[in-house]
Amino acid sequence: ANLSGANLREADLTGANLRKALLWRANLSGANLSEANLREADLREANLSEADLREADLSLANLREASLSEARYNADTTWPEGFDPEAAGAVLVEDND
């Protein structure tokens, strides 16, 4: 799916299959992406601030210059190899938060 530049602010995308989706410069601020499949997604320059990324699969995703300020994730969130979510501004939460 090509969703480049799409405004998906506060969208409920729980469990969505966005594998290999083009989300370049998409606005996903405040979106619920918990349990979403974002494997190999192009999230360059995307706004993921305050998004819920708990249990999301972001393995092999391109997060270059993506905004992750205050995005929430948990121990079951899968990140690209070598990616540091805390350095990018994301916040680790417990499952019951």
Image (cartoon, rainbow, N blue to C red):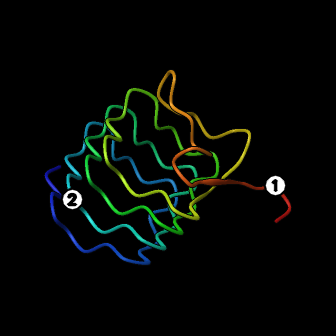
Percent of width and height locating residue 37: 44, 42
Along the viewing direction, whichever of 40 and 64 lies nearer the viewer: 64
What's under tag 2, amino acid-wise?
A: Arg
What's under tag 1, amino acid-wise?
A: Asp
Q: Earlier in the sequence, mark 2 or mark 1?
A: 2
Query: Left or right: 51 with respect to 2?
Result: right
Mark 2, secondary structure of its residue: loop
Query: Left or right: 60 with respect to 90?
Result: left
Q: Which residue is mark 1?
A: 95
Q: Nearer the viewer, mark 2 or mark 1?
A: 2
- Residue at (36%, 34%) from the top-left corner? 61
Q: Quadrant of residue 5?
A: bottom left
Along the viewing direction, whichever of 18 and 27 lies nearer the viewer: 27
- Residue at (51%, 38%) from the top-left corner? 57
Along the viewing direction, whichever of 90 and 17 lies nearer the viewer: 90
- Residue at (13%, 52%) from the top-left corner? 2
